[in-house]
């Protein structure tokens, strides 16, 4: 997937929140929001797939530890449509990361027991309008 926005040197603590606002492209095949320590160590890869890697309308979540993907977690819901303008809100605690979107909320375990988020990346068919880092949810 095409690399988009990348933010490093972050200091996002448990209970704080990362908001990414933007638009899912009209012909989107998939996009992903990654958070973690760096590109090789991800607490969460949140990857809505409209039609890619053999998946149709499926959210795939995963972690990455020292460059190696963990076990994929596929979600039952897919509350996204081509062309949607959405805001994605990511927060975490010692147990799990939470992703809130307008029509859904998803959890994924904090497998690497990360204590802060230092890295954010948005990739694929999503245009970023705004990002916000907030010390409150
Ligand atoms: C792979 C894909 C990666 C990532 C990963 C998640 O198949 O190439 O971009 O989505 O799955 O497990």
Image (spheres, rainbow, N blue to C red):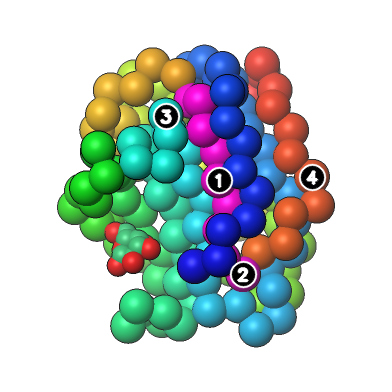
How packed mark 2 is, by other alpha carbons closer than 10 Å (few <14, some 14-19, many 20 or more), is many
Does label 3 or label 2 sit earlier along the sequence? 3
Q: Residue at x 62, y 36 (%)?
A: 7
The Cα–Cα distance between marks 4 and 1, rounded to whole angstroms, is: 13 Å
Give me the disc on residue 26. none
| Residues at circles 2 and 4 in contact by the CB criterion of under 8 Å | no
The Cα–Cα distance between marks 3 and 4, rounded to whole angstroms, is: 21 Å
Q: Magenta segment: does it hold 60?
A: no
What span is in magenta?
Answer: 117-125
Residue 96 drawn at (x, y percent): 35, 31
The Cα–Cα distance between marks 3 and 2, rounded to whole angstroms, is: 23 Å
Side of 36 where 68 appears, left or right: left
Give me the disc on residue 130. 4
Provide the residue designation for mark 3. 37
What SS does tag 2 mark? loop
What SS does tag 3 mark? strand
């Amino acid at each position: 997937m095409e690399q988009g926005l990348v933010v490093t040197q972050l200091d996002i603590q448990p209970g704080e929140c990362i908001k990414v606002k933007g638009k899912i492209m009209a012909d989107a095949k998939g996009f992903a929001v990654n958070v973690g320590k760096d590109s090789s160590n991800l607490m969460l890869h949140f990857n809505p797939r409209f039609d890619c890697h053999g998946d149709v309308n499926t959210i795939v979540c995963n972690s990455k530890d020292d460059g190696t993907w963990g076990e994929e977690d596929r979600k039952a819901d897919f509350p996204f449509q081509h062309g949607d303008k959405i805001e994605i809100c990511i927060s975490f605690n010692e147990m799990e990361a939470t992703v809130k979107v307008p029509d859904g909320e998803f959890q994924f375990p904090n497998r690497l027991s990360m204590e802060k988020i230092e890295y954010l990346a948005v990739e694929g068919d999503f245009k970023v309008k705004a990002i916000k880092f907030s010390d409150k949810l």
